[in-house]
Image (cartoon, rainbow, N blue to C red):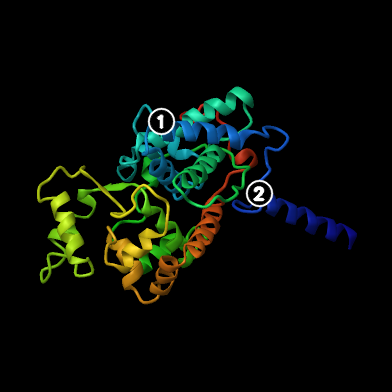
Amino acid sequence: MGVMREMMVFLFTILLIMQRGDGQLVENFYSSTCPNVESIVNRVVSTKFSQTFVTIPATLRLFFHDCFIEGCDASVLIQSPNGDAEKDAPDNLSLAGDGFDTVVQAKQAVEAQCPGVVSCADILAIAARDVVVLAGGAPFSVELGRRDGLVSRASSVKGNLPEPTFNLDELNQMFAKHGLSQIDMIALSGAHTLGFSHCDRLANRIYSFSSSSPVDPSLDPAYAQQLMQSCPRNVDPQIAINMDPVTPRTFDNMYYQNLVAGKGLFTSDQVLFTDASSQPTVNDFARNPLDFNAAFATAMRKLGRVGVKTGNQGEIRRDCTAFN
């Protein structure tokens, strides 16, 4: 009986070790090995922000794109001489260089104080929180202890990031694959209160929505006209347009107020309000910024646990852009 019990304990321990994801991350992971890591990263992020606002949406988007492919393991940062790493995938070519630069600079600053200790994946997670706070969002604590991934393939990206044309079911299915609920998905979509997209990502909503209605009827008519002025037919598809037409440089709940007013930029934004099953959450976040901030913090912590590498599943990269 004693041998049996010991065997069960041993198997349970092995299962815990093999398990990927939450349960392995803690807020004070570097308390004895690099106690100032968060202040070091914050200093770099703040300096980078003072140089360009793009630091904020670029870093936040980089974290999301990283976590949804191989998990939160900084695989999106790898540069390949063959152009076949995650960042080279078509869906990632629009990731702004300022996000990458922020993490690389923060890693260099951390290495100067604590060489070989802090992963690029953790630095990206800290930086993503810091940019939210710098833009006016509520602070939240970040769980740490990730290791950097050993794989980065462009071929892994296609079909694993939300498309601007997605309906609610498609959004929920993609987020559920990563243990994220509908409320998590709606809260994380609130990051679209910052930053910009490009005309080619929304042209179908204002010029070719359907045979009966070239303009998406869920768009506010005045907003549709505004979009047409910003993105005339045959314009350079890479012309940038703000995701939030009201407060594009502030992390707030205006995104949800815009959805209520028919001013969601993508179909995948506006559907959160037009679909009856998600509309109550949008209405709540539009009216109650505290509810949104709390849900966003919860969702970011859950997102940060996706596909986490620990132990020999990963490494601590010396250079965030290259495997050791």
Q: Residues within 10 Å of mark 2 (few under 14, many from 20)?
A: some
Please state, as top left, top right, bottom left or bottom right, where the N terminus lies in the image: bottom right
| Mark before the other along the chain sequence, 2 or 1 | 2
Please identify the residue farthest to the top as the structure is shown. 112
- Residue at image location 54% in from the left, 37% down from the top: 123
Element type at mark 1: loop
**Is 321 left, or right, of 144 in this rendering?**
left
Q: Which label number is shown at residue 79?
A: 1
**Is 211 left, or right, of 171 in this rendering?**
left
Q: Which label number is shown at residue 24?
A: 2
Q: Could you give the CA–CA distance between mark 2 and mark 1, rounded to whole angstroms?
A: 28 Å
Q: Which label number is shown at residue 197?
A: none
- Residue at image location 47% in from the left, 30% down from the top: 104
Up-down relation of residue 243 to residue 181 (above or below): above
**Is 2 left, or right, of 157 in this rendering?**
right
Of the pair 313 and 181, the residue shown nearer to us: 181
Three-letter code, disc 2: Gln
Up-down relation of residue 16 to residue 215 (above or below): above
Please identify the residue farthest to the bottom as the structure is shown. 276
Please state, as top left, top right, bottom left or bottom right, where the C terminus lies in the image: top right
Q: Is residue 99 visible?
A: yes
Q: Is residue 324 visible?
A: no
Of the pair 271 and 285, the residue shown nearer to us: 285
> Splitting the image into 4 quarters, where does residue 84 fall?
top left
Up-down relation of residue 191 to residue 222 (above or below): above
